[in-house]
């Protein structure tokens, strides 16, 4: 296996998270490179089929949409546009996920070939190894570009240590034709239950463009009146 393969240009990434005592969470992210844009949807299947939150970053502008209950008071304009642009979020979101899509096995011990598998119609080679949590923690700390990302990563590592995880089993499925990660999974069985995070990637068609929400469904944040509870 190549140590570093290709990164995706524009792609869809679906992440599934399983933590002990918590509902399964599905995070669907669409990213386009030219122009850079990000759309994110978060689902909690146990609460229904509709997304609990949607976010779009287009041209540096952030658009947010909550679930049906939280958006009820917004009527026909469920999308809220932030009043300030945040182009740096676009760079951080895209660069981090694009890096995940390139198979890098430098932090994986004992990597071995498991076999050939077909995932979503794509022929892949399945590899497996392990990595210690301490090494993962150091890599996340070094790769974080913003304070918020560093805090988020630190909270994640704290949870892993709370569950007594010392080492993760890492599974990587590499697209045989494109030499890109098709799926990445880290998992550990703990006394409190299974901890598992899976990322699945899908390339988007050339010319795919991510657009802002329809203008007639958007309200500017500055036009809202917030009431203290």
Image (cartoon, rainbow, N blue to C red):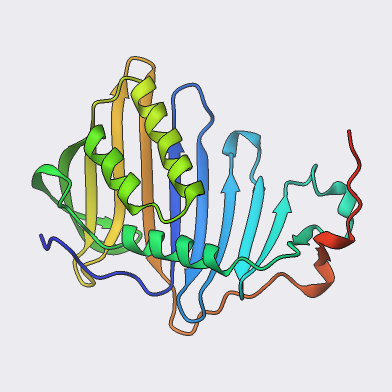
Instruction: Please state, as top left, top right, bottom left or bottom right, where the N terminus lies in the image.
Output: bottom left
Looking at the image, can residue 77 be seen? no
Side of 55 relative to 194 (left or right)? right
Looking at the picture, does residue 129 appear above or below residue 20? below
Frontmost residue, 49 versus 37: 37
Instruction: Please state, as top left, top right, bottom left or bottom right, where the C terminus lies in the image.
Output: top right
Q: Position of residue 15 (x, y in %)?
A: 44, 49
Q: Position of residue 194 (x, y in %)?
A: 36, 26
Side of 104 relative to 69 (left or right)? left
Count of labels shown? Answer: 0
Looking at the picture, does residue 194 appear above or below residue 150? above
Q: Look at 13% across and 60% down and name the residue there.
A: 3
Looking at the image, can residue 189 be seen? yes
Q: Position of residue 185 (x, y in %)?
A: 30, 44
Q: Look at 36% across and 35% down and name the residue there.
A: 196
Looking at the picture, does residue 174 appear above or below residue 199? below
The answer to which image quadrant residue 215 occupies is: bottom right
The answer to which image quadrant residue 217 occupies is: bottom right
Outermost residue on the bottom side: it is 207
Side of 135 relative to 140 (left or right)? left
Q: Position of residue 107 (x, y in %)?
A: 17, 47
Outermost residue on the front side: it is 147
Q: Look at 27% across and 60% down and name the residue there.
A: 181
Q: Look at 44% across and 29% down and name the residue there.
A: 19
């Amino acid at each position: 296996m190549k140590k570093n393969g290709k990164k995706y240009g524009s792609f869809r990434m679906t992440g599934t998270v399983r933590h002990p005592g918590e509902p399964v969470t599905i995070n669907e992210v669409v990213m386009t490179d030219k122009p850079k844009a990000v759309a994110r949807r978060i689902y909690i299947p146990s609460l229904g089929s509709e997304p609990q939150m949607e976010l779009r970053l287009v041209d540096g502008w952030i658009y947010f949409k909550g679930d049906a209950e939280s958006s009820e008071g917004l009527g026909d304009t469920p999308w809220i546009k932030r009043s300030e642009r945040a182009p740096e979020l676009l760079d951080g979101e895209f660069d981090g996920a694009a890096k995940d899509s390139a198979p890098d096995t430098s932090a994986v011990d004992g990597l071995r070939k498991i076999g050939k598998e077909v995932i979503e119609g794509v022929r892949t080679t399945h590899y497996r190894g392990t990595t210690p949590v301490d090494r993962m923690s150091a890599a996340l700390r070094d790769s974080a570009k913003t304070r918020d990302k560093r805090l988020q990563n630190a909270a994640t590592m704290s949870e892993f240590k709370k569950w007594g995880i010392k080492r993760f089993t890492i599974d990587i499925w590499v697209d045989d034709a494109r030499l890109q990660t098709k799926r990445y999974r880290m998992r550990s069985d703990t006394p409190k239950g299974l901890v598992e995070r899976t990322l699945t990637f899908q390339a988007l068609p050339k010319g795919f463009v991510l657009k802002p929400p329809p203008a007639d469904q958007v309200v500017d944040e500055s036009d809202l009146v917030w009431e203290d509870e």
